[in-house]
Image (cartoon, rainbow, N blue to C red):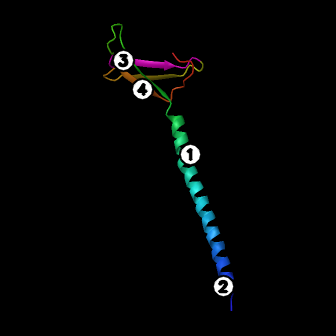
Amino acid sequence: MIPTQFFQETYRRQAAIRNRWIVVGLFITSVALAIPRLAQAQASAGMTGTVTDSSGAVVPNADVTVTNQATSVSLKTITSSAGTYTLKASIPENTT
């Protein structure tokens, strides 16, 4: 006959292993959910603004060019009907 203590020890060991796998699974899930958020934060850099004339009125459909002075890389866009523009992934260094 097998003593009852043997079954209790086996159950405790199985419960400990199960709990470890749950912790490992939660950790992996947390890391997997955090990585896209970190990458998204880096990709959301950009520049927004409003183009106005000397009287302060907005200028719709104006050409906007932003140039990085260090690399001479230019990004171009056109303002909206409200005179606003958005440039995604621009480099926030020395720009004109």
Q: Nearer the viewer, mark 1 or mark 2?
A: 2
Label of residue 62 in the image: 3
Q: Identify the residue at horizontal 66%, vertical 85% (top origin).
A: 4
Q: Which residue is mark 1?
A: 35
Q: Which residue is mark 4?
A: 86
Q: Which residues are magenta?
A: 59-69
Of marks 3 and 2, which one's residue comes earlier in the chain?
A: 2
Q: Which residue is mark 2?
A: 4
Q: Which amino acid is tagged 1?
A: Ile
Tell me: residue 16, above or below residue 87: below
Marks 4 and 2 in Cβ contact (< 8 Å): no
Q: Position of residue 33 (x, y in %)?
A: 53, 49
Q: Nearer the viewer, mark 3 or mark 1?
A: 1
Structural crowding at the residue carrying mark 4, measured as other residues with C-alpha within 10 Å and reported as few (<14), some (14–19) or many (≥20): some
Task: Give the Cα distance between marks 3 and 2.
Answer: 84 Å
Is residue 64 rendered magenta in the image? yes
SS at badge 4: strand
